[in-house]
Amino acid sequence: MNTEAGASGPRHDQQVDAEEAGPGVGDLSGTALRGAGWLAIRQGVTALFTFAGIVVLSALLPPADFALYGYATTVILLAASVGDLGLGAALIRGDSGDRHLKGSFALQLVFWVPVCATIAAVGSIGDGVFGFSLATISALSAALLLLSLQTLPTALLERQLRFSTLVAIETAQRLIFVTVAILLAATSGSQSSIPIAILIAAAAGYPVTLIATGWRWFPQFVRGEPIFRGFSSDWWQARIANQVSYAAYPLLGGLLFAAADVGYMVWAVAITSVPALLAPTVARAVFPAIARASDDEKARIYRQMFRGVLLLGVPLVAIIFTCAEPLVRYVFGERWLSAVPLLRLESVTTLIGLALTTVVPLLFLTLSEKKVKWLMVMAASATWLLVPVLALIMSYRAVSVTTIVVTATVLVVVDLSLRRRLDYSLLSEMVPATIGLLASVLLGFVIVGLADDLATTFLVAGAIGLAQLAVNIVLGGGVNLRSVLRLISEGRRGATVESSPTVPAGS
């Protein structure tokens, strides 16, 4: 998100391009490595804030009110993923002159203002589709607008590799969100506590992001903006499909199940998302190297990254799956015990998600963009079609079961595609970590009975996590950290991404 402000014109465009060109080639390795470090720090801090917020809000709010956490996080993910309408891709690629910035801003306003106003209007009619109050739906709609508008200046920061600035802003926003949500839940306990918190965080972060970029571009319509066509459009539609799949939990769940059941679903997803928080960050950091590499090199680079994600994420999956009951009992409280089966189901979706989240950059850079897009669209459609049918049999567990079935199918299709194109197999790469997971789960079911208080629960959890890690490493699933850092530092300017890849340079 950084740009110099000033009068429009060719001279100013040249100034912007020169200042946004980033470090010279000799400095790229160090810059990319520092960027990866900043992103890892940001994700670690965010994970701590997120988990702390979930624990405290779980204690303050009943499941029915905690369901609003799912709607708030849907707004965050939707805005971050599709808020730029695909226009941020062109900014990251290099089109950052006055004309493009003004036109992109105008298109954002034309799209998002009516969409958010419509959401607020429809949601406020009567009791609303989900029974939201006027304050709740208004706060969610306004937050969606502000966070979506923030994506363009964020893209400028990423293009300039100003990761330290970006990390500071995003971390502060998450801290504001969690802190305000806890304070409002403790003092008022109203339905709108979490939505108002996300609105305050969005209102605080957007102007700071504009200031960080020196933003002075007013909206102005111009012809030829790269929207709803080409690579950016395919990428944008694919990201929409991914978010629609995630939104099935609060949105489709809110239509089919009671508010308390939706609260259990959202809570289980929030807990099990912690092992996967590093996955999009790692993909974001190594994408420049993948974008510039040959097919053989792409597979080699991705392999190191994926092994690292499995090394860090799967032990947490093993702990959550095996120690679900004592963790819930001693950390979150008795009233959440009904969600233990959901927690175990969502652990399985997390395991699959570790692969599918990280592989998206590789797919878009090696396969047909349209085929990748339609694969994701079909997966989202299948999820929304199957959930109502399975809900007749398994109630609110239907969303989790459907997600497992659909994502497992997508994983097999992706694996077959990569085998044909790169002679690389995701499923084969997952074998050591999966065997380690099975071994640690078997061990866990033997020793989990020892967890009769919080201290022993943590000890048992640690033993299970270490067991998974040891088996994974023994079977050759470890990663050479020095090799990973070297691969990250091989990245080139112009291919940074948001939370997954956007557009490779020159597309």
Image (cartoon, rainbow, N blue to C red):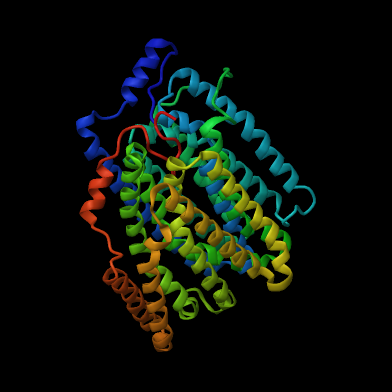
The quadrant of the rendering that contains the N terminus is top left
- Residue 88 coordinates in the image, percent (x, y): 48, 33
Q: Residue at x 32, y 39 (%)?
A: 293
Q: Quadrant of residue 440?
A: bottom left
Instruction: Indicate left or right for 158 with 75 as reference.
Output: left
Q: Is residue 175 visible?
A: no
Q: Residue at x 37, y 61 (%)?
A: 429
- Residue 319 coordinates in the image, percent (x, y): 41, 74
Quick one: 486 or 424, which is closer to the camera? 424
Q: Residue at x 69, y 38 (%)?
A: 117
- Residue 232 coordinates in the image, percent (x, y): 52, 33
Q: Residue furthest top?
A: 10
Quick one: 116 or 111, which is closer to the camera? 111
Instruction: Indicate left or right for 494 with 249 as reference.
Output: left
Quick one: 200 or 159, which is closer to the camera? 159
Q: Quadrant of residue 237?
A: top right
Instruction: Indicate left or right for 298 with 54 as reference.
Output: left
Instruction: Indicate left or right for 400 with 393 as reference.
Output: left
- Residue 249 coordinates in the image, percent (x, y): 62, 59
Quick one: 101 or 377, which is closer to the camera? 377
Q: How many marks?
A: 0
> Does residue 191 sit above or below 87 in this rendering?
below
Q: Residue at x 31, y 41 (%)?
A: 289
> Does residue 274 sit above or below 482 in this rendering?
below
The quadrant of the rendering that contains the C terminus is top left
Q: Residue furthest right?
A: 126
Q: Is residue 151 visible?
A: yes
